[in-house]
Amino acid sequence: MAVQRLDRGDLWKNKARVLQLQLRQRFRVAVDRHRPSVLADRYFSSSVQRWLRRFRDFRRDSLPSSSSFYRKKVSKDFDVEVDSAIFRMLQAVAVPLIGNVCHVFMNGLNRVQVYGLEKLHDALLNRPKNKPLITVSNHVASVDDPFVIASLLPPRVLLDAQNLRWTLCASDRCFSNPVTSAFFRSVKVLPVSRGDGIYQMGMDMAISKLNTGGWVHIFPEGSRSRDGGKTVRSSKRGVGRLVLDADSTPIVLPFVHTGMQDVMPIGANFPRIGKTVTVLIGDPIIFDDLLNSEEATEASRGKLYDAVASRIGHQLQNLKVKVDKLALEQSIRLENHSKDGAERAANILHQVDLDPFGLGSHEYIRYESLVEETRTKLNDMSPEEATADVYTRMGYSCEGGIGSRIRSYMDPTELMGFAARGLLMNCRSKEKYSDTSDIRPLKTWKQYLEANMLKQWNTC
């Protein structure tokens, strides 16, 4: 039985081979065992080849493929669901609430240093009616929007939900289930799908908002920075379509920020407080030379998209260099201010009358030498080692002197209270002096707090 089955199998193989040879000789068709029914044009007649070319040309001209670029017009009422009455009611409540909370968090619990803020306010509040606005920025942390956007706007602007920004977010992150989809739609977020190209529905929805004179904020890099915000990557082609396919050319305003990597580090579940964020807003980007040149009329749509995206990317990279320089200068000023505050506090203690503490003049001379030694150590320190905490420790931990003797009986805050009382006993109420030894104790205590504690608290 097994031998008969093998014979039958060989017989069918031989018959198939004979049939294949007959078909090849009669119809001159190249038969491929791995890709059956693949026909070569060289075996067709000239008329069939001509009709085939006409069909290919018709398909290429009438149905643009994914690799070709064209202008796709979008109507103003493209997505009725987003502009429905229900979502408008949710937006009127959620956008002002979340925006003001983020504004208080950034400006109250953190420090935001903004350069060129008037440019954003002018483009947002004083642009012509129905003139669209696009803001572009680098993407460092997952909370760049709404934290940075909210920190740049005054509370009265944040209450106007209708004129606030629309933004884009990946559907696999923000629209993964009905609950998150409803929430992000209520805060004016549009879904985009990764890998679906620039002609997907989310991009069409963004263009429809621009056609109504709205404000769209976008991250041209397409995703968050992979090096903690140290560099700005090249811009994607999608931002070029937003600029070119809108009914009227929008105002494109770039800004770059640094410091959000400290507010929301990678892997953190909650934002941090007491950090400094520096924002630099640039001038509006002009595209008239690209749109009105003779080369633009002859260039393909894809090249125009790339040219617009490249210009935006270069502008963001230039702003990134400037904002890093501004942030470095700001940190140096804060370090110098902390150093000056610590030295100012040391000078105040230096002028304290030591008799109320039960200390003699020899201890006072010893204290003077310790002050000079502390100043020498502070001057020899590098900027990285010189912090306010170091100044405080050096001021109160000099072994063998007044600091070590008093510290064994009281903490530094009580020490400053006694110092202020010593100044009270030593001041002369009828005379006016310019040095710190004759300032009243309450002013001295306030001066110390402003130089060390309150200043740091306000910068948080």
Image: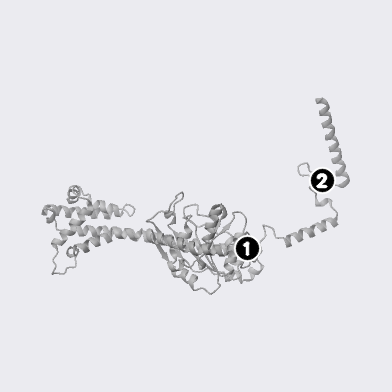
Q: Distance between the residues labelled 2 and 1?
A: 40 Å
Residue 37 vertical placement versus 288 (above, below): above
Residue 179 in view, yes or no:
yes
Residue closer to the observer: 437 or 416: 416
Horizontally, is 112 left or right of 314 in the view? Answer: left
Residue located at (82% from left, 25% from top):
3
Which circle marks residue 303 in the picture?
1
Circle 2 — which element? Answer: loop
- Dot 1 amino acid type: Lys
- Dot 2 amino acid type: Ala
Residue 38 vertical placement versus 129 (above, below): above
Circle 2 sits on which residue? 30
Horizontally, is 402 left or right of 155 in the view? Answer: left
Query: Residue 79: image x %, image y %?
Result: 61, 63
Please state, as top left, top right, bottom left or bottom right, where the C terminus lies in the image: bottom left
Residue 116 in view, yes or no:
no
Residue located at (21% from left, 56% from top):
416
Neighbour class for label 1 at 10 Å: few (<14), some, many (≥20)?
Answer: some
Q: Which residue lies furthest to the right in this view?
A: 26
Circle 1 — which element? Answer: helix
Query: Residue 431: image x %, image y %?
Result: 14, 69
| Lower sequence index among marks 2 and 1 | 2
